[in-house]
Image (tube, rainbow, N blue to C red):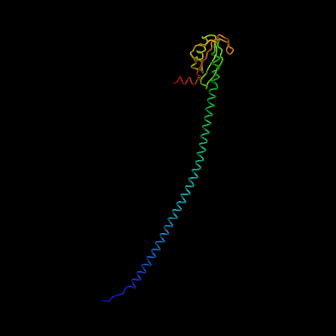
Amino acid sequence: MRRINLLPWREERRQKRQRDFVIHLLLAAAVAVAVSFGIHTYMQAQIEHQNDRNAYLEDVIQELDRKIESINELKERKAELTARMEVIETLQSNRPTIVHLMENLVTTLPDGIQLSDVSVKNDEAISIQGMADAQARVATYLRRLNDADYLDEASLVGSGILAQSSKDDAGFKAGRYVFSIEGKITPPGDDDADKED
C-alpha cells in the first residue's frame, strides 16, 4: 500500500489555526478592553453623577439647616415675646386689683380703728397691722374684710387674742388694742371660677 504524505497540508492547517487563534485572542482581548473601558466609563459617569447629586443634596441640606436655625431663632423670639406679653397682661390685670383692694380697706374700716401697716406679698396675700379702741371693732372690721370684694380668708394672726398696748406706739394712744390680720387677695374673676368648680 502506498503512503501519502499529508504533513504539509496539516502544517498549513495548524498554522492557519494558530493565526485564527491569535486573531481570535486579539479580538477577545480587544473586546475585553473595550468592554472594560465601557464599563469603567459608565461607572465613572455614574460616580460623577452621584457626586453631583450628593453635592446638590449637601447644598440643599445646608440651606435647610440655615432655615431651621432661623426658625429656631424665631421660635425663641416668639417665646420671649409671649413671656413678656404674659407678664404685661398679668401686670395689667393686677393693677386695678390693688387699687380696688386699697379702696376696700378704706371703705370697710370702722370708726375707732387706725391702720399702722399694710403690706402685699406676691400679689396674693395681704398683711394688715393696726390698733383699735375695742376688740369688737376689730371683729367688725374682720367681718367686713371677709365680705368685701378682692379679699378673702381674712383672719387674725397668732392666737387671736389682741394685746393691749401699754405705751404710745407709732403715734397711737396708750391703752389701745394691737391687731394683725392676714388675708388672701382674690380678684372677682377668681371668685367666680371657684364658685363654678
Residue 77 rendering spot, x and y as whole percentages: 62, 39
Looking at the picture, does residue 194 appear above or below residue 29? above
Q: In front: 179, or 56? A: 179
Count of marks, rendered view: 0
Q: Residue at x 61, y 34 (%)?
A: 83
Q: In front: 158, or 104? A: 158
Q: Specify the farthest residue to the bottom.
A: 2
Looking at the picture, does residue 30 appear above or below residue 185? below
Residue 8 rendering spot, x and y as whole percentages: 40, 85
Q: Specify the farthest residue to the right.
A: 171
Residue 132 quadrant: top right
The answer to whether residue 74 is left or right of residue 29 is: right
Residue 91 rendering spot, x and y as whole percentages: 63, 29
Residue 25 quadrant: bottom left
The answer to whether residue 105 is left or right of residue 42 is: right
Residue 40 rendering spot, x and y as whole percentages: 51, 64
Looking at the picture, does residue 89 appear above or below residue 26? above
Looking at the picture, does residue 130 appear above or below residue 51? above
Q: In front: 45, or 10? A: 10
Q: Specify the farthest residue to the front.
A: 166
The answer to whether residue 1 is left or right of residue 197 is: left
Quadrant (top left/top right/bottom left/bottom right) for the N terminus: bottom left
Q: Residue at x 36, y 87 (%)?
A: 5
